Amino acid sequence: NDSNELSAWKHQVAMTYNGATGKITIACPNEKVAEKLFGSGGLNNVYSTMENFNYGNWGGRTSIGGSSRHHRLSLKEAQDCFFLLEDLMQTKFYNKEETAVT
């Protein structure tokens, strides 16, 4: 399988929440996969969306990044971020990839 294809990965994106620090990390296997899921710029599109919902400053690279080091997120906020990430991924993924396959 080509590692730049979504089908090559069982998990195209992962999100972790560290309850001790209140920090979230989001990662994709590589930049190409991130851009296929979230559009040009990959996870950079996610960071700006999270900031719009007042979850602190976010940042990172195209395929890895997360929440601010200076803003502690509660478990509830982390759950909200997860569902927002899921919505962003499904919107990009299903519109671009799945509909072309079915």
Image: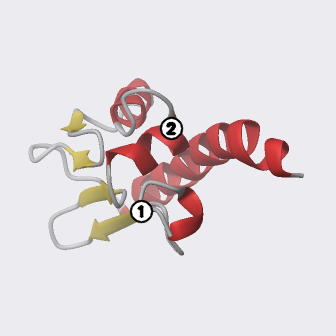
Q: Nearer the viewer, residue 63 or 82?
A: 63
User: Relative to 67, is 48 on the left or the right?
Assistant: right
- The residue drawn where x is 25% and y is 48% is 66
The answer to whether 13 is drawn above or below residue 87 in the figure is: below
Residue positioned most to the left: 70
- The residue drawn where x is 59% and y is 65% is 7
Between the C-alphas of marks 1 and 2, the distance is 17 Å
Classify 10 Å Cα crowding around label 2: few (below 14), some (14-19), many (20 and above): many
Q: What's the amino acid at mark 1?
A: Ser
Q: Which residue is mark 2?
A: 38
Q: Quadrant of residue 15?
A: bottom left
The answer to whether 27 is drawn above or below residue 71 in the figure is: below
Query: In the image, residue 24 lies at what x, y percent?
Result: 28, 57
The answer to whether 90 is drawn above or below residue 54 in the figure is: below
Q: What's the amino acid at mark 2?
A: Phe
Residue positioned most to the right: 102
Q: Which residue is mark 1?
A: 3
Q: Nearer the viewer, residue 17 or 14?
A: 14
Query: In the image, residue 93 lies at what x, y percent?
Result: 65, 45
Q: Earlier in the sequence, mark 1 or mark 2?
A: 1
User: Relative to 7, is 51 on the left or the right?
Assistant: left
